[in-house]
Amino acid sequence: MIRDRLTSQENQSLWDEFRAGNPDAFSRIYELFSADLYRYGYNLVRNKQLVEDCLHELFVHIYNTRQRIGPTDNILYYLYRSLRRRLTDSLARLNKFDSDDYIFEGAEFLVESYETELVEEQTLDRQKQIIIAELNRLPKRQREILYLVYMKGLSYAEAGDVMNIAMSTVYNTVNTALSTLRSFVAQRLAREGISIVVTVAVLISLLTS
């Protein structure tokens, strides 16, 4: 499972160095996570300028408050949560649309280049493409929860915290999303003549590979 390519210990060590005032640690955090945060933010609102502004404000904020923020062993989770809240707050202030209804409306997940580069077999590549396509047919909340949990490696509790939903809702949403996605993918694979038994375990392995 891809989890920002750092172990929990490496996450904690880098974050602690940043909180202690190490400028190289701050630069490293920006280099590691800014592109992924932009992709996540853009998937949320599809507003390039708003995402760039909120992302800039987020990094300025954590830098200015580095001595007061708490520890973490998952930097990506911490930054996802902070960016999402900034985006929803900004949308609410703009009064242009209902932020909860707009999030993920019509958005598609951007497939990261390193993920596609890792695919070695053509059939597996096609299966993953189908999963991404069918994932985008799911309701917006289901898409986001699967993206956070299975594609970005957040725990159920972390994903629930990012999305500001109760754990019971997280479990129900994940179960419903996986069941629906499994059905979508199985039908699509059958139409294309690809022979694979789509169990939930297979589905998760393809999402996380």
Image (tube, rainbow, N blue to C red):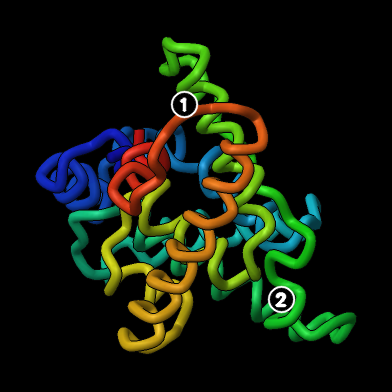
Identify which residue is drawn at 40% across, 70% down: 174
- Confirm or deny contact between disc 2 and disc 1 (CB under 8 A): no
Can you give x and y, in whole percent of width and height, for residue 122 in the image?
Answer: 52, 13
* Mark seen at residue 90: 2
Residue 112 location, quadrant: top right
Can you give x and y, in whole percent of width and height, for residue 97 in the image?
Answer: 85, 82
Residue 193 versus residue 182: which sits nearer the camera? Answer: 193
Q: Amino acid at mark 2?
A: Ser
**Disc 1 packing (10 Å; few <14; some 14–19; many ≥20):** few
Can you give x and y, in whole percent of width and height, for residue 77 in the image?
Answer: 35, 59
Residue 38 versus residue 121: which sits nearer the camera? Answer: 121
| Left or right position of 74 against 34 | left
Identify which residue is drawn at 31% across, 84% down: 167
Q: Quadrant of the C terminus?
A: top left
Identify which residue is drawn at 35% across, 40% down: 208
The residue carrying mark 1 is: 115
Cα separation, mark 2 vs mark 1, equals 31 Å
Q: Quadrant of the N terminus?
A: top left
> Tag 2, which secondary structure?
helix
Identify which residue is drawn at 55% across, 38% down: 35
Q: Amino acid at mark 1?
A: Glu
Can you give x and y, in whole percent of width and height, for residue 67 in the image?
Answer: 27, 65
Above/below status of 33 relative to 149:
above
| Left or right position of 192 against 32 | right
| Count of marks overlaid on the render | 2
Q: From where the camera sits, is residue 23 visible? A: no
Residue 75 versus residue 174: which sits nearer the camera? Answer: 174
Which one is closest to the eye, mark 2 or mark 1?
Answer: 1
